[in-house]
Image: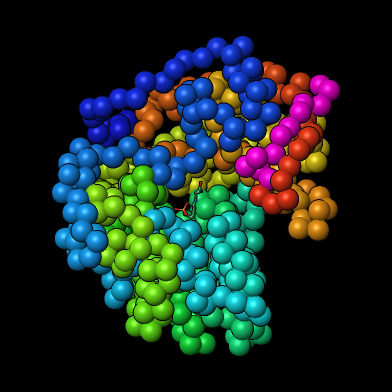
C-alpha cells in the first residue's frame, strides 16, 4: 500500500480547543508576541518542541504502575538499566532528570577553563554547560550542513578533515570529542555510521573519549538504514548498537527517543569517570539508582526504548516530516532539504524577504502561523542567536522557523492542516510586519523577550 498510516489506534484523547483568528490575535498580543508566553490551551497545533511531548503507549502507562519508589536498589532501575544496555552497550548507566543534567554532570568533570570540545553542532544546552564550565564549544559540521538547500543524505556529519586538523592543533586542551545524532541544531539532520565510526577512530588516535549526544538515536538509525550504502538489510536495533559501540559514552534526553515525558541519562565506560559522575549525581540529582526520576519514570523509559526502534513507527515518523516538507516545497515555501527527522525547518529570511534580519523574519513568520492557524512553532534565528554577550546585535546565520513534531501525537489531517495554513499565508506573506524587541533579559532572550509589530510594509 502507498499510504503510510499511523501505526497505532487512539485510546485516550486530549481535546483541542478551536479558537478564532480574532481570539488568537488577542492572545498573542497579550503574550507580547512571544510564543513561549502563550497558554498551551490557546494553541491548536503545538509544534514548539518534540521534547517531552510524546504520547505514551498503553504498555507505558501500565508500566508506570510497576514503578518501585525505593530510594536504593529499585527493580525499576534494574529494568531501566537493562533496556538501555540492550541498545547502548556502555558499562555505567547513570540516570538523570533530563538531558541537560547529564551534560552538566559530564562537563563539571571534563570541562573547565582552557578546554575545548568539538562536535558536529552542540545543542544549545550542551554549549551552555560547556561554556559555563569555562571551556569552549566548537562546531565542525560539514559545509553542506550549513546550507539549507544543499541535498546531502547525511548533513549532520562532522567534517573529518576539520576534526583531524583541530585535534592535531588543540589535542592538549581537548578532553573529549562529541557528535549529536541527529544534529538538532543543524536541522535534525542525520550522521552516517561511517562518519560516527571515523570520528571514533580519530578520537582514539588522540586518546580522547568519544561521547555521543544520542537524543534522537532511533531516527538517526532509520536514516542510516534508508540512506547508507551497505546498511539496508540491518535492523534498527543492530544499527543503534553499532553506532554506540563506536563511543565511550553518551548523554541522552529520554524526552525525545525515549518516548517519555521526562528523563535522561549519562552513560560511560570509564570507571573513574563514572565514579566522579555518580558523586556529582548524588550532589545534584539523587542516588544513582534513580537520579532525579521517580521509579515509574524509569519504567516508562524502559518500555519506551522497546517501542522507539519499531520500524513501522519510524517509517510513519520520518514520512510525516518529509510529507509536510515536500508539500511546502511544492508550493514554493523555502524549507530545509532534505527534511530532518523531528522537525520541518522553514527559511523565513528567504520567504519573508521584505523583512530585514534585525526585524526578525523568523519571529514574524512564527507569529503569523499562530494568528492564521493557531500553530505554535519556534524561531531559530536572530532572536535566539543575534545578541552577543557584549550587548551588540548582529543577524544570525539563518532565520528559520522550526516546526517540531511531537511523537505519536498528531495525525495526517493535522499535517494537511499545517500545509493549508501555509497556503493561506502565501497570499498575505508580503504584508506581514517585522517586529521590534521592546524588552529583553541579558541572556537567552527568546524565552522572555517582549515584541511589538512595526508598521506594515
Ligand atoms: N541535546 C539535544 C540534541 C537536544 O535536542 C536537547 C533538547 C538536549 C540535548 C537537552 O535535553 O531538554 O532533556 O535537557 N532539545 C529540546 C528541543 C529542548 O526542543 O530541541 P533536555
Q: Nearer the viewer, residue 23 or 179?
A: 23
Using the image, determine if residue 319 lies above or below residue 365.
below
Residue 253: image quadrant is bottom left
Task: Give left or right: position of 245 versus 404.
Answer: left
Task: Give left or right: position of 7 versus 181.
Answer: left
Q: Position of residue 215 (x, y in %)?
A: 42, 56
Q: Residue at x 55, y 12 (%)?
A: 20
Q: What is the quadrant of the N terminus in the image?
A: top left
The magenta-colored residue range is: 445-457
Q: Nearer the viewer, residue 409 or 135?
A: 135
Using the image, determine if residue 86 lies above or below residue 432.
below
Q: Position of residue 329 (x, y in %)?
A: 58, 34
Is residue 285 part of the magenta span, yes or no? no
- What scheme was used to colour the molecule? rainbow
Task: Give left or right: position of 3 versus 251.
Answer: left
The answer to whether one can see residue 146 in this image is yes
Q: Residue at x 63, y 48 (%)?
A: 148
Q: Nearer the viewer, residue 319 or 378?
A: 378
Q: What is the quadrant of the C terminus in the image?
A: top right
Q: Position of residue 83 (x, y in %)?
A: 23, 60
Q: Position of residue 115 (x, y in %)?
A: 62, 79
Using the image, determine if residue 286 lies above or below residue 136.
above
Q: Residue at x 65, y 23 (%)?
A: 30
Q: Residue at x 47, y 24 (%)?
A: 41
The answer to whether one can see residue 116 in this image is no
Amino acid at each position: 500500500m502507498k499510504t503510510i498510516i499511523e501505526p497505532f489506534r487512539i485510546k485516550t484523547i486530549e481535546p483541542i480547543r478551536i479558537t478564532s483568528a480574532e481570539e488568537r490575535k488577542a492572545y498573542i498580543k497579550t503574550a507580547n508576541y512571544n510564543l513561549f508566553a502563550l497558554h498551551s490551551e490557546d494553541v491548536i497545533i503545538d509544534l514548539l518542541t518534540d521534547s517531552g511531548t510524546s504520547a505514551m503507549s498503553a504498555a507505558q502507562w501500565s508500566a508506570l504502575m510497576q514503578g518501585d519508589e525505593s530510594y536504593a536498589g529499585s527493580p525499576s532501575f534494574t529494568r531501566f538499566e537493562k533496556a538501555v544496555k540492550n541498545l547502548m552497550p556502555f558499562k555505567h548507566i547513570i540516570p538523570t532528570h533530563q538531558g541537560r543534567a547529564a551534560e552538566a554532570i559530564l562537563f563539571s568533570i571534563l570541562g573547565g577553563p582552557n578546554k575545548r570540545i568539538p562536535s558536529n553542532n552542540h545543542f544549545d544546552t550542551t554549549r551552555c554547560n560547556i561554556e559555563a564550565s569555562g571551556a569552549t564549544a566548537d562546531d565542525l559540521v560539514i559545509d553542506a550542513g550549513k546550507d539549507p538547500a544543499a541535498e546531502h543524505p547525511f548533513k549532520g556529519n562532522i567534517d573529518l578533515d576539520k576534526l583531524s586538523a583541530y585535534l592535531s592543533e588543540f589535542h592538549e586542551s581537548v578532553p573529549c570529542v562529541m557528535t549529536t545524532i541527529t544534529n538538532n541544531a543543524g536541522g535534525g539532520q542525520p550522521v552516517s555510521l561511517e562518519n560516527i565510526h571515523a570520528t571514533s577512530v580519530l578520537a582514539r588516535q588522540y586518546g580522547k573519549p568519544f561521547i555521543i549526544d544520542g537524543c534522537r538515536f532511533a531516527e538517526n538509525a532509520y536514516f542510516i538504514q534508508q540512506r547508507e550504502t551497505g546498511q539496508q538489510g540491518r535492523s534498527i536495533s543492530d544499527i543503534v548498537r553499532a553506532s554506540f559501540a563506536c563511543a565511550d559514552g553518551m548523554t541522552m534526553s529520554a524526552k525525545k527517543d525515549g518516548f517519555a515525558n521526562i528523563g535522561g541519562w549519562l552513560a560511560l565506560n570509564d570507571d573513574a569517570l563514572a565514579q566522579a559522575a555518580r558523586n556529582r549525581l548524588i550532589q545534584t540529582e539523587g542516588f544513582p539508582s534513580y537520579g532525579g526520576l521517580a521509579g515509574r519514570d524509569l519504567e516508562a523509559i524502559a518500555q519506551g526504548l522497546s517501542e522507539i526502534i519499531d520500524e513501522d513507527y519510524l517509517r510513519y515518523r520520518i514520512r510525516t516530516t518529509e510529507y509536510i516538507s515536500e508539500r511546502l516545497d511544492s508550493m514554493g515555501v523555502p524549507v530545509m532539504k532534505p527534511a530532518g527527522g523531528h522537525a520541518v525547518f522553514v527559511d523565513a529570511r528567504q520567504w519573508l524577504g521584505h523583512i530585514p534580519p534585525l526585524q526578525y523574519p523568523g519571529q514574524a513568520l512564527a507569529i503569523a502561523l499562530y494568528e492564521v492557524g493557531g500553530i505554535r512553532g519556534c524561531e531559530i534565528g536572530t532572536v535566539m542567536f543575534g545578541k552577543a554577550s557584549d550587548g551588540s546585535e548582529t543577524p544570525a546565520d539563518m532565520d528559520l522557523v522550526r516546526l517540531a513534531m511531537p511523537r505519536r501525537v498528531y495525525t495526517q489531517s493535522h499535517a494537511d492542516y499545517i500545509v493549508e495554513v501555509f497556503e493561506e499565508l502565501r497570499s498575505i506573506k508580503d504584508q506581514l510586519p517585522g517586529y521590534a524587541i521592546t524588552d529583553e533579559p541579558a541572556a537567552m532572550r527568546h524565552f522572555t523577550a517582549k515584541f511589538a509589530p512595526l508598521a506594515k510594509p
